[in-house]
Image (tube, coloured by chain):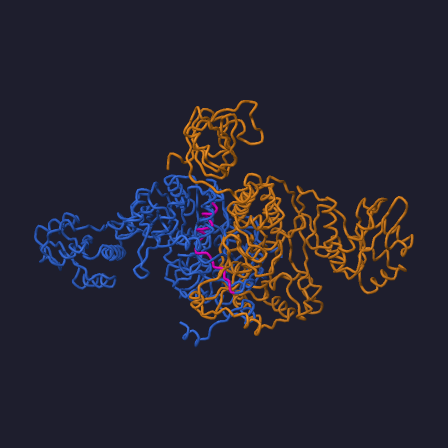
Chain colours: A blue, B orange
Amino acid sequence: MEGVIRTHRAIECSKELIGKTVTINGWVQKNRNLGGLLFIDLRDRSGLIQVLFDPEVAPDAFEIASEIGREYVISVTGEIVGRDPKNINPKIPTGEIELQARQIHVFNPAKTPPFPIADDRVDVDESIRLKYRYLDLRRSKMQETMVIRHRAMQSVRRFLDRYGFLELETPILTNSTPEGARDYLVPSRVHPGSFYALPQSPQLFKQLFMVAGMERYFQFARCFRDEDLRADRQPEFTQIDIEASFISREQFLSLMEEMIQTLFKETINVDISIPFPRLTYQEAMERYGSDKPDLRFGMELVSLNEILANTSFKVFASTIANGGQIKAINVKGCAGWSRKEIDNWGKVAQSLGAKGLAWLAYKEEGVKGSVAKFLSAEEIRAIQQATQAETGDLLFFVADRPQMVANVLGEIRVRLAQQLELIDPNVFKFTWVTEFPLLEYDEEDGRYYAKHHPFTAPMTEDIPLLETNPDQVRAYAYDMVLNGYEIGGGSSRIYQRDIQEKMFKALGISLEEAQEKFGFLLEAFEYGAPPHGGIAFGFDRIVMLLSGRSNLRDCIAYPKTNSASCLMTEAPSSVAQAQLDELHLRVKEDKEITTNN
Amino acid sequence: MEGVIRTHRAIECSKELIGKTVTINGWVQKNRNLGGLLFIDLRDRSGLIQVLFDPEVAPDAFEIASEIGREYVISVTGEIVGRDPKNINPKIPTGEIELQARQIHVFNPAKTPPFPIADDRVDVDESIRLKYRYLDLRRSKMQETMVIRHRAMQSVRRFLDRYGFLELETPILTNSTPEGARDYLVPSRVHPGSFYALPQSPQLFKQLFMVAGMERYFQFARCFRDEDLRADRQPEFTQIDIEASFISREQFLSLMEEMIQTLFKETINVDISIPFPRLTYQEAMERYGSDKPDLRFGMELVSLNEILANTSFKVFASTIANGGQIKAINVKGCAGWSRKEIDNWGKVAQSLGAKGLAWLAYKEEGVKGSVAKFLSAEEIRAIQQATQAETGDLLFFVADRPQMVANVLGEIRVRLAQQLELIDPNVFKFTWVTEFPLLEYDEEDGRYYAKHHPFTAPMTEDIPLLETNPDQVRAYAYDMVLNGYEIGGGSSRIYQRDIQEKMFKALGISLEEAQEKFGFLLEAFEYGAPPHGGIAFGFDRIVMLLSGRSNLRDCIAYPKTNSASCLMTEAPSSVAQAQLDELHLRVKEDKEITTNN
């Protein structure tokens, strides 16, 4: 074996090695006969090298090489030779040389792969890619993504280590989370009828690290949520989990900015300027209709309530009278759109919940549009000024409850930008969104829930509102937003008993109930809790943005499908009855399921 | 808040800062009144600083400080002053200065902890420590262990990154492991009656990374085993999981030695010399009665079969005739032990399964011992020579089946060394144990099992024995052993189809069965598997040895008890019926359990 083990990786073979004997190991990317010679592109993780088999030079090797096919695993020993100038391939780093084979050893043959490995522009059905993930991962784009993922992990670790953060592990077998999403459960064999739960995040554990005096903690934490999956969700995901004590919010946010700046520089060599701009939640919703605005383009939402305060157009007037909003976005240069095109956007608005989408087109020949005739010339001029509309621009309006206006126009803004190709995919626009509402009212349950979690600190000046106007209380919570994605979210935590009690009261949780749900955390806080706060970044999503992918599954080595299955291993699967017996469990029959639910 | 946030960590306050104003945040370690002044030892993660409250200088701060107790979380702002030479405390790094307090802010009060935080020599019941883990973790020895754990992780990562290993994650929600220990199961909600399993190791996934051309992989992998726990086992544990392609075994082992050398240097500043000595499995068993020998002391097992080949002592003669062994260890200088002491060791031997423990004492006044009168003077002399016994030495003998001799004498050797304090706790003795048997026969099941796992490669020269003498086949498997602990184990893997088929045959697994159990891995191997191998290190155990602890639980932030419970969070626990309904599960009643099992 030893004699066929590689001496160099493909990429290391350059002109400096000409005349030297090397052994390269790898996969056959391509093989072709040319004028009685045989050329093989040999691929290893580092890249490609061209191997030349000449029957005159090495007849045995030539014969063996003639019999092998793509994706065979081979070892080739030979001499590095320079290529004829006319054969130099500037597209690959080893394009100036080739390997003149003396010996070949076939480690393993390969069946023809179900899709091409060499060319990853070929579109392959995702279910085939996931079933043969070990082949999909051989393709260069996937290799590149995994390398970026690796580099990103090392960069973040180095940074946090440098700033005194300790990487500490928290349990995967833990307890069900009160007030959270749906947990994955793990039945206990030793304690029949009891269950562990897989963590949705290490939130409680990291706060306990602060009580424990660890001061600065981080972890690449595996987290689990048994939710119905969307394209950008996975049942298990990785978050960069961070918590710190005795540090001001400003110091902390600026440290996180520096971390992300370093990450982008070290993984994809992109310069990010810091500090990041900041938007309060309210500003973000007002201007972009979203708490994770994409700032790579403008097209801001413009409020027309003031201009239309006394309008005689009844629809708008009654919207304002009922506490609603009228907002517009300016679709630059699209006044010439056909009625059909505009109507299509109206349908989009309706599918998002709006009653409709009003429009005005500032054309050469005058102002047209669904609301043109209902508005005064004065109003139309004022609207033009407020939206900075020029001749040739198209305005879309939504008049509705503020939340609906934001949702609909916010979403239409993004879709328009995509369709109009206003977005430069090579630009990274960061922002902090701050001052999130502390609480959210759940109509169904008739109570408030914590928007972030029940330990998020209310802003000091809003604490009095906890009893009187809970929905107006803002939190010391912050999201880091990149190109329309929330990539991280965090907050300062409540560490004082009296404020925690007020918070539970606002949530309608009695102290007894709180004790039952969060007992050990509340008890821990009695023994000397420092002021602390933290953040969690969605690492899979960061990798997605770093590597320019549009799908989280492409950024995880072995992902699950939308039905939480692994197509390669066929997990989940049935297990032996004996295993269930040991756990004292029985799977209900269909009949029982119908009866009991 | 900002005004009370720390400017320095305690340890950063040195003579260079004298005259400067600083703000320190931390916990009250100790407070005492002395001549009208108040002294507080303030502790943060970095260490301690003495704070002086003088009623003349800062009456308000003095008053507040007089009211606070141990473990209160405070912020102190004041001036660094030099201590009187007579008050210098050389025991702490900040012993030359103190902080003259101007202002104090109390972040949080603290109840009296259930055990002392400042003095971790105090022996505290472990269940109390685990229930209040957040307080236990404040104690300096635990802090130190967690810092070592952090440093060890970073050191290994940096090393492997430098050598081109990619850190890649594998799923936690996966499938039940065939041929493994007991799995933790996770019921699927989306696929009723189906289950995920938590991984016992990422073995299959890491081999698939090799098929995927990743070439060099590592991960700090969380692994799970639902076993009955011993003191040195945890239901979830962390292993440094490593796999590599296209590298010779020798290159790989020497890389791993260098990694461990670097780790010890970077975490605890200990120099380890490489290469490590090697023992074959057979040698280790012969000389130490263990496949994880502690080499910090001698007391090797000496075979006496040759010397006693023709003995007239029937017990020994029949042992040899039945294929058994007679071995001795030399307990240096203990010939003077009382009969009672020696008998106690006889009881130990019996509790380990031996029929008894024979002995000979080479005393000034002549040879005494249980077998003295049965052996000839010639034999006694020969034994003395073989065991290098001098006057004053005591020999213990076991005569039994080879496995029993090894188990009993191997264990007695270790316990003797502990009792006789032959072990220097500051010494690290590494060894590789190689050439493990490939297979183990299970009497109960009447079949062979893979000693490591079914993909471990047999040694080339032993492959013919797979069909004729399976129990004589040695594997390309290697364990790294440190001070009597197996800290890592690995092997070269089978990557050729014909050898894999021979292996399954030896295991009594039909190809259909293999297909069913390992289908996707076997299929993957058809598409071009490179030669590869790897290792997994028990990270928790390495931390234990690095930090000089004797208990794995002390090296894990939030460990489980021997009954797999977390005393702090009370996991596992009961869950709502609605959660089980969603999973289509029912916990069996006690009655059913009795009936069905």
Q: Nearer the viewer, residue A401 or B568?
A: B568
* Residue A420 visible in this rendered orientation of the protein: no
Q: Is residue A314 left or right of residue B135?
A: left
* Residue A186 visible in this rendered orientation of the protein: yes
Residue farthest left in this picture: A377
- Residue at (29, 60) in percent of width and height: A443
- Total numbered labels: 0
Measured from the top left, where is residue A190 in percent x and y?
56, 62
Looking at the rendered image, the quarter that the C terminus of chain A falls into is bottom left
Residue farthest top in this picture: B85
- Please tell me whether residue A431 is drawn above or below residue B536 in the rendered image: above
Q: Nearer the viewer, residue B532 or A26?
A: B532
Q: Nearer the viewer, residue B243 or B89?
A: B89
Residue farthest bottom in this picture: A591
Instruction: Specify the segment rendered in magenta.
Output: A193-209
* Residue A517 image-quadrant placement: bottom left
Measured from the top left, where is residue B74 in percent x and y?
44, 36
Measured from the top left, where is residue B418 in percent x and y?
72, 47
Tell me if residue B241 is in the magenta stretch.
no
Q: Is residue A328 left or right of residue B274?
A: left
Looking at the rendered image, the quarter that the N terminus of chain A falls into is bottom right
- Please tell me whether residue A53 is drawn above or below residue B511 in the rendered image: above
- Please tell me whether residue A16 is drawn above or below residue A581 in the rendered image: above
Measured from the top left, where is residue A446 in percent x and y?
31, 59
Q: Nearer the viewer, residue B336 or B199?
A: B336
Q: Is residue A148 left or right of residue B357?
A: left
Tell me if residue A197 is in the magenta stretch.
yes
Q: Is residue A562 left or right of residue A404?
A: right
